[in-house]
Amino acid sequence: MTLLSFVIPCYRSELTIKKVVDEIKETVALRGTEYDYEVIAVNDCSPDNVYKVLKELAAEDKRIKLIDFAKNMGKHAAVLAGYAVAKGEYIVNLDDDFQSPVNKLWTLMAKFDEGYDVVMADYPKKKESAFKSFGSKVNSFFIRVLLDKPKELAFENFSVMKRFVTEEMMRYRHPYPYLEGLMLRTTRNIAIVTVEERERGDDRSTGYTFIKSLQLMINGLTAFSVKPLRIATLMGVFFSIIGFVFGILTIIRKLIHVNTVLGYSSLMAVLLFIGGLILLMLGLIGEYIGRIYICINASPQYIIRETVNCETDTDQ
């Protein structure tokens, strides 16, 4: 019997998480005794009563395992905490809002017969706000540029991967985990399956705030690539050349036209632009240095308050 581990980070989902768990049970039951399941739900210090709902579900079914964070650590840390507990041959990543079509699981699983390591759902039409869609596109662009992600590859929250992939991803022990970077560092043997994304299982809006989208973008910029620093170097060389050429042209103009009055406004505009770029690059370098400092001080990926039905120690 093949064991499937469903990893679900939970945040503001008290009205939807039971629907997700029930659909998991129904979907696995369709294959009879061929597959068994475990559900690892990670409560990322949610302000609602989702953990209470999860404890009720875990009391009824020991295959439902819970991890309760002492503070909000972000979705990526929650997923890695779930991986640390998962024992399945295949690990399934799901959303907690019922948007992931779990009933299409076997369509994704069929791709493993072709030798893929990871199979991801691809949603042709996203059921999300314009703001979240824009943030996702920006994040995808930076991943493609900085981590050499294939253009056709879209990272969605519904995916299945072989166990060795999660084991390799868990070797990353530092704070600021970035799942897309960890996955691309492990394998690029990834298949895409087109499925239809559903509407949320409740009437709440997404918890994807501007601050979270900004943090995700910064994490993507600095997590697994030094390309931003190389770009800063190239920009420095570029503007140095422009400044040198502009200086030569200014001297020539002054020699030819003695009465030429240099423009104060244009000079200030150039100074402000260059000054802004310098501050931006210094901030980028500071971000790298700050992350190095935090890693040296062994800041944890997550802090666990309590576990339920878990046999593995997941403290980091």
Image (cartoon, helix red, strand yellow):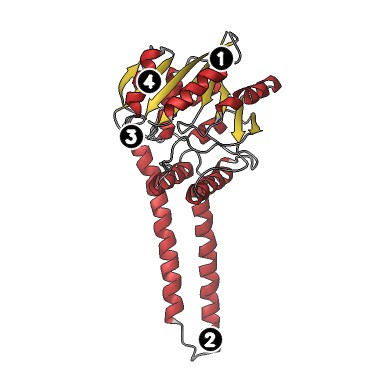
**Quick one: label 4, few (<14), some, or many (20+) residues within 10 Å?**
many
Mark 1 and mark 3 lie on one chain; the one further toward the N terminus is 1
Which residue is disc 2 drawn over? 255
Mark 4 and mark 3 lie on one chain; the one further toward the N terminus is 4
**Does residue 3 appear in this view?**
yes
Residue 253 sits in quarter = bottom right
Q: What is the C-alpha distance between the residues marked 1 and 3? A: 34 Å
Question: Closer to the camera: disc 4 or disc 3?
Answer: 4
Amino acid type at image mark 1: Ala
Question: Closer to the camera: disc 1 or disc 4?
Answer: 1
Q: Are marks 3 and 2 in contact (CB under 8 Å)?
A: no
The residue sitting at 46% across, 19% down in the picture is 39
Is residue 160 placed above or below 3 in the rendered structure?
below
Which residue is disc 3 drawn over? 72
Q: How many marks?
A: 4
Q: Callout 4: helix, strand or loop?
A: strand
Is residue 157 placed above or below 61 in the rendered structure?
below
Residue, far right: 114
**Quick one: label 1, few (<14), some, or many (20+) residues within 10 Å?**
some
Which residue is disc 4 drawn over? 66
Q: What is the C-alpha distance between the residues marked 3 and 2? A: 65 Å
Mark 2 and mark 1 lie on one chain; the one further toward the N terminus is 1
Mark 3 and mark 2 lie on one chain; the one further toward the N terminus is 3
Question: What x and y, as percent, mark residue 69?
Answer: 32, 27
The residue sitting at 51% across, 64% down in the picture is 240
The residue sitting at 49% across, 48% down in the picture is 129
